[in-house]
Image: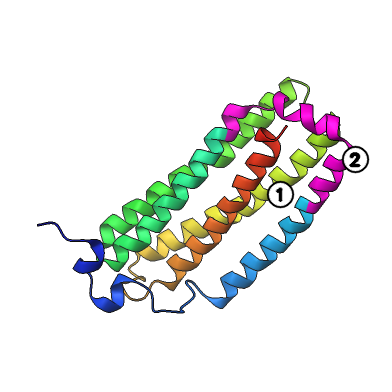
Amino acid sequence: MSTTLAERLPLQDAAPRAGRIPGNKGIWVGICCELAEFLVLFTVYFVARAHYPHEFATGAGRLNLGAGIWITAAMVSSSFCIAASIVTLRNGQRRTSIAWLVAGLLLALSYPVVKIHEVQWNLAHGIDGTAGIFFTVYYYLTINHMVHAFWGILGILWVLFRHVSGVYTSTEHEGLEALASYWHATDLIWLVLFAFFYILV
């Protein structure tokens, strides 16, 4: 008979202690700063949208929706892989955990690659920062997000190096949890950006 993941784990490994915050205090300070920054930027978005409703209503239709969907799929899938890396490590499956983290890294790397191609496509279609207020806000927020994603990718590389080096165990993997927390926050922000720029008209 098959057993659940929790049944296969010792009680202390099956789930974090009640009330325990994953990762560490430092990463949560960083996440709060990131969220506060984008809260300000989202305010800028809504102010600009209120003043230029026509440009925002027509701007989304000029963007490359396929690129936006690809980035969204890559971000969500990458977050899933990193979460799976934690779960499998807690289960004592170190090699599987590393494989999940590598998969998360590859998916994360596809984001800047697709974004660069998207910007090239935009420029070829006359969509640059001077094409209107919608595109000025679009470039500012999405490029800002890509910077945060780049920091996350560097984090994945660092955590992967430590993981391969045997630093993390089924009971001690704070760095992996910190990475996952940051990447999930970055993923959540992208989902909002995707809706704001590619979906809402």
Q: Is residue 53 magenta?
A: yes
Q: Earlier in the sequence, mark 2 or mark 1?
A: 2
Residue 98: name its quadrant: bottom left
Label 2 sits on a secondary structure element that is helix
Q: Main secondary structure of the magenta part?
A: helix
For label 1, the crowd category at 10 Å Cα-Cα, with few meaning under 14, some 14 to 19 and many 20 or more, is: some
In the image, residue 122 sits, relative to residue 193, either above or below, namely: above
Q: Nearer the viewer, residue 70 or 118?
A: 70
Quadrant where the C terminus is found in the figure? top right
Residue 185, image x and y in percent? Answer: 57, 58
Instruction: Name the residue rendered at 47%, 72% in the picture.
Output: 22
Numbered range of the magenta stretch = 43-68
Q: Nearer the viewer, residue 162 or 175?
A: 175
Residue marked by disc 1:
144
Residue 112, image x and y in percent? Answer: 58, 41
Residue marked by disc 2:
51
Residue 135, image x and y in percent? Answer: 79, 34
Residue 96: name its quadrant: bottom left
